Amino acid sequence: MSSFWSGWVMFLVVLNLGVTLFLFVWAQVVKIPTQPDGTSGHVWGGSVREGVRRLPTWWVILSASMFVATITYLVLYPGFGARKGLIGWTAHGQLATEIAENDLKLAPVLKDFDSRGIEQLAASPQATGMGYRLFVDNCAACHGLQGRGGAAVGAPDLTDSDWLWGGTPDAITKTILDGRTGVMPPMGAAVGSTEDVRNVAQYVLSLSAWPHDSVRANLGRAKFVACAACHGPDGKGNPALGAPNLTYDKRLYGSGAATIEKTITEGRTGTMPAWRQRLGETDVRLITAWVYAQSHTSAQAPGR
Ligand code: HEC
Ligand code: HEC
């Protein structure tokens, strides 16, 4: 708050409080001249005489305590312009204290989590519950609220047993901590003509038993050698490169022939951001536990 606005707020507070306090005090001490009959002598409409009554004591006490409370508050707490208040209370400070208290309470729980393996954590509803809340805050924008994936950014389904980079506890932890980038280079030139690209796309469809043109698929099979280095001779993928398993019927980028042709000619780059800096290892292990539990049904799986 600039000193002008601070001064302005102080001025308004003093003015308002001053005027009301003055009226309140004045009403206690002012002597209203009364007639012998106890009225003010003013007659309304020719017949109603105006009486003079003191304010009831309970009202006076209530009003006085309101003034005391207001002034005490303005002395102790922020509110009088930019003044900080005697006890130095701030909303930020209170939040920080509450967070610190909460961290202190959580510390033994988290320490215990750190000493347990991912499989064990995946079986603990407390750990996966915390993991799921972190997942919703940080991951759901790309992977969906239930972790089922999002084709817009090529974010994979995390609840199935098909993995780009491997589904062991260690592989999943590494993926989340350090991120991953899957690069499929443009392959149009390596495959040949547009016709060849269409044929290979039909072959890719045939790998996962999607409806396809079998004549084209047979022609495309021969061209698949260009792809085998990464996707494997039978198209089952390679977790060392993050090359997807093309025999699995759920795709990162959609399953239409046109989408696959686009992938072949233009290539794709799928980027999973790194979380080590942002979340730290303890939180990442909790999220890993939740992710692991989704694809391993014997474990607990809240949020499904
Ligand atoms: C900006 C979007 C985005 C966000 C946010 C994001 N991811 Fe990803 N994630 C991706 C993409 C894209 C891939 C696929 C990377 C590739 O193509 O190799 C991926 C891949 C993964 C994989 C590898 C899956 C596999 O099959 O091997 C895991 C596990 C994963 N993400 C978990 C998470 C978790 C947990 C979070 C939150 C902490 C998260 N992601 C946040 C986009 C995102
Ligand atoms: C250099 C390694 C490499 C080569 C060669 C390669 N790919 Fe890929 N391909 C990848 C990677 C890595 C991805 C995942 C890209 C991503 O994460 O966004 C991918 C993704 C794809 C996808 C998308 C899968 C999905 O789930 O949506 C298709 C389809 C595909 N490749 C087909 C092919 C075909 C057909 C060829 C041969 C013409 C080929 N790839 C050659 C590495 C390769």
Image (cartoon, rainbow, N blue to C red):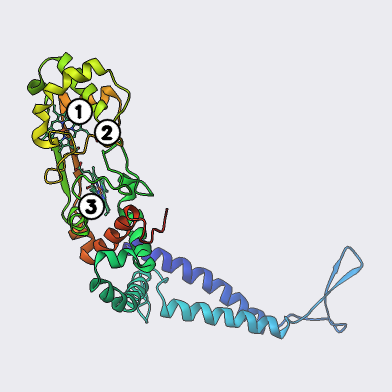
Amino acid tagged 2: Tyr
Side of 261 where 14 appears, left or right? right
Closer to the camera in the image, 266 or 18:
266
- Residue 182, image quadrant: top left
Q: Earlier in the sequence, mark 2 or mark 3?
A: 3
Q: Is mark 1 within 8 Å of ligand 2?
A: yes
The nearer-to-camera label among 3 and 1 is 3
Q: Quadrant of ligand 2?
A: top left
Distance, label 1 to label 2, CA atoms, is 8 Å
Q: Residue at x 12, y 30 (%)?
A: 227
Q: Is mark 3 within 8 Å of ligand 1?
A: yes
- Residue 47, image quadrant: bottom right
Residue 198: % across, % down: 20, 18
Residue 261: % across, % down: 21, 23
- Please give the residue where the numbered disc 3 appears in the rendered image: 167
- The reply to whether dot 1 and dot 2 touch (C-beta < 8 Å) is yes
Let me know if residue 143 appears in the view: yes
Q: Is residue 280 above or below residue 200?
A: below
Side of 266 where 22 appears, left or right? right
Residue 278: % across, % down: 22, 59
Dot label at residue 40: none
Q: Is residue 222 above or below residue 178?
A: above
- The reply to whether dot 3 and dot 1 touch (C-beta < 8 Å) is no
Dot label at residue 253: 2
- Local crowd at mark 1 within 10 Å, few (<14), some, or many (≥20)? some
